Image (spheres, helix red, strand yellow):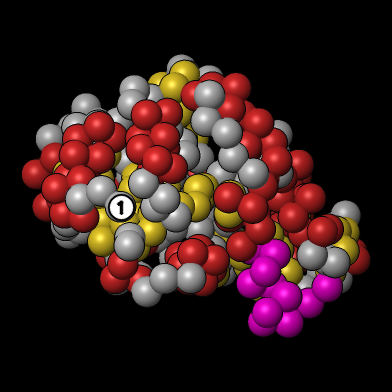
Amino acid sequence: MPGFIIDLDGTLYAGTNPIAEAAPFIHYLQDHDYPYMFVTNNSSRRPEEVAHHLFQVTGIQANSEDILTSAQAAAKYINENILGRKVFMIGENGLAHALQNAGLHLVAGPEDKPEVVVQGIDRSFTYAKLAAACRCLWEGAVFIATNPDLQLPSEYGLTPGAGSLTAAIQAASQVKPVIIGKPSAIIMRYAIEHLGRKAEDIWVVGDNLATDIGGGVAANCKTAWIRSGVGAHLAADELIQATGINPEVTCSDLYQLSCIITARYGHV
């Protein structure tokens, strides 16, 4: 039986707008007892807030345990690799909660000698935060970025993502970050472990060819590219050629994917 790692932003919703066929697709998985997990590069919300937003926008019900955020994965990675307990954070509530919940101590700046700089989406990003992050990195802190997404789908169209802030910090500090979110193998490994299935039995479903599908390919999973979010207005063959990433299947929507799954596995 296959399992599914499913993206959220751009795949099931765009900001406060639902993506067509999102709820029917999840109901399809539930009806056939296919295990799944929602994996998001967005670090701004707690898992329970992600679940609430998902329900409010799409009507899909989920528990916190069904969701893995890049913030949670970043906290887990820091603890697993014993990078330090003191963290200078650039981010929002979801990232702060994940770090503190993992027993890490958030500090105000370079004067506190943090061992780690963790950066996610921060819609209050300032020059002062950029300068503080650089000072921490120049003094030896490890640079952790929650995800490389340069753009984030919203109800207003595309907006700058966490990766745009990462690019500014990296350019200014000349320190390369450890990337946690898709397409990194780090978050993919955590999700695969949670599902308890072999990678080759898991479908990664997402709208972003570079991150969602790239992560699935890197993890040796099956991949389904849904043309609903980032790059939906561009020609599919041009994006595939530009990225060098070839999804196993390309679907106009999630209904088409459900038909492909039925054809391959039948009903259980």
Q: Is 166 on the left-hand or right-hand side of 202?
A: right
Q: Nearer the viewer, residue 239 or 164?
A: 239
| Neighbourhood count class around disc 1 (C-alpha, 10 Å): few under 14, some 14–19, many 20 upward | few
Residue at the image position 35 percent from the left and 71 percent from the top: 199
Q: Residue furthest front?
A: 268
Label total for image:
1
Task: In the rendered view, tell whether residue 251 sits above or below residue 53.
Answer: below
**Can the viewer see residue 74?**
yes
For residue 211: magenta?
no
202 to 229, vertically: above or below: below
The residue under the point 73% across, 75% down is 79
Q: Is residue 74 left or right of residue 79?
A: left
Quarter residue 53 falls in: top right
Q: Residue 138, how many percent across, how many down? A: 69, 71
Magenta segment range? Answer: 74-85
For the residue pair 206 and 156, the one nearer the viewer reads as 206
Q: Position of residue 202 (x, y in %)?
A: 34, 62
Secondary structure type for disc 1: loop
| Residue ID for mark 1 | 268
Instruction: Give the position of the N terminus as an image quadrant.
Output: bottom left
Q: Is residue 268 above or below residue 252?
A: below
In the image, residue 137 lies at what x, y percent?
69, 68
- Give the amino acid type for the residue marked by disc 1 in the picture: Val
The reply to whether residue 243 is visible in this rendering is no
- Whole-percent x and y of residue 146? 58, 56
Q: Nearer the viewer, residue 62 or 57?
A: 62
108 relative position to 67: left or right: right
Is 76 within the magenta?
A: yes
